[in-house]
Image: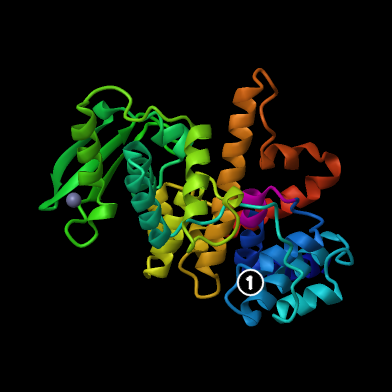
Amino acid sequence: MDTHAGELRLASIRSSLDAYASQLRCWMRFCAVTGAPLMPPEERTVARYVSIFRNSDSANKYVSALRWGCDFLGVSVAGWDTRSLHQVVKGLGKLRPSSKKKAHAIRWDLQRLLIKCALRRGELQQATAYNLAGNFLFRVPSELLPLEYERTKVINHQGKLARQVTLPKRKNKPHGSTLIRHCRCPGDKIMCPVHALGDLSHAERRTKGRIFSLNVTGFTRTLRTHVAAIPEAKGAPEEYSSQGFRRGTAREMLAAGGTLAKILEAGEWNSKAFREYQDSEEIDAAAILEIIVDADEAEDEIESAVQVRAPAAAPQTAPKRAAKRGAESRKITEFFGQVELAAQ
Ligand SMILES: [Zn+2]
């Protein structure tokens, strides 16, 4: 009889698990990407989590699953399941904490103005750098500025003139990546990746070696000077940095109706985390995109800081942090292992 009761209990847990597994996995992914602790949840993390859902009903569902997970594990919900969080879920509150200041997204209208500004000043390299940063969603310091002429060529792609760039290695792409962007002439000549670099090569009479003699400090300083000269640019010049191009192009694609999957693919962001949810009706693509881009930039910053201060210890990644919490978290790990299994 005990066995029977046990089986019943297991069956009930199993069916609850199945019902909640997808929602709880979303919480796991969110924590993995942002580096936030899985359990016990923190109020500010849950408040940020809530922002990825399209509406209150969806947010409520996912928050209920999280509450259920805490109850099941005997983890107190008092720390996060607060009145102010309920207000946030209802869309009434603004608990959503502003994370650290991030670079302004440089949308294409502003990219065009920046290019024009650079061209007027005869800064052809800077203008070309803006163009390529926007088109290819490059990380400016590590991918764009070291780029060599030998890594790019003009090809015919799907019957159209295109520029191809091959990166020997890229974050999330250890074996490198080949990127192709079509000519935008004549409609959007200023943003054309084929002809902009062609013009630079022609003007400087160079077809070999490093394209740019700019370093990232110089690039950023000039960018801010240009921003200061453009009345349409919002905010202070110091709020702009080279990362703004990657984020700006992503937003541009989203505004043009691009799916999250397509955008993540274009920028080669690590899209594994939210793959299961990225076409979900419940998830807000723009919010997920911001979270993925934020996490990616934070990683880049850690990486460059580590390079500067070598041989500093490698940065702790979220899974390592989670593993460090010791025996008390074994139950939690097992539980979320089950949640993972329920996906299969
Ligand atoms: Zn063109």
Secondary structure under the numbered disc 1 in the rendered image: helix
* Quadrant into which the N terminus falls: bottom right
The colour scheme applied to this rendered structure is rainbow
Relative horizontal placement of residue 120, taking residue 269 as reference (left or right) = left
> Which residue lies under the disc numbered 1?
19
Residue projecting furthest to the top: 311
Q: Which residues are magenta?
A: 29-36
Residue closer to the observer: 270 or 202 = 202
Q: Does residue 17 appear in the picture of this structure? A: no
Query: Residue 148, percent across and down?
Result: 31, 27
**Occupied quadrant, residue 214:** top left
Q: Is mark 1 within 8 Å of ligand 1?
A: no
* Total residue callouts: 1
Residue closer to the observer: 158 or 340 = 158
**Occupied quadrant, residue 235:** bottom right
Query: Residue 176, percent across and down?
Result: 36, 33
Q: Residues within 10 Å of mark 1 (few under 14, many from 20)?
A: few
Q: Is 69 placed above or below 142 here?
A: below
**Occupied quadrant, residue 185:** bottom left
Q: Residue at x 66, y 75 (%)?
A: 59
Relative horizontal placement of residue 44, taking residue 189 as reference (left or right) = right
Magenta segment includes 31: yes
Relative horizontal placement of residue 75, taking residue 237 as reference (left or right) = right
Residue projecting furthest to the left: 159
Amino acid type, label 1: Ala
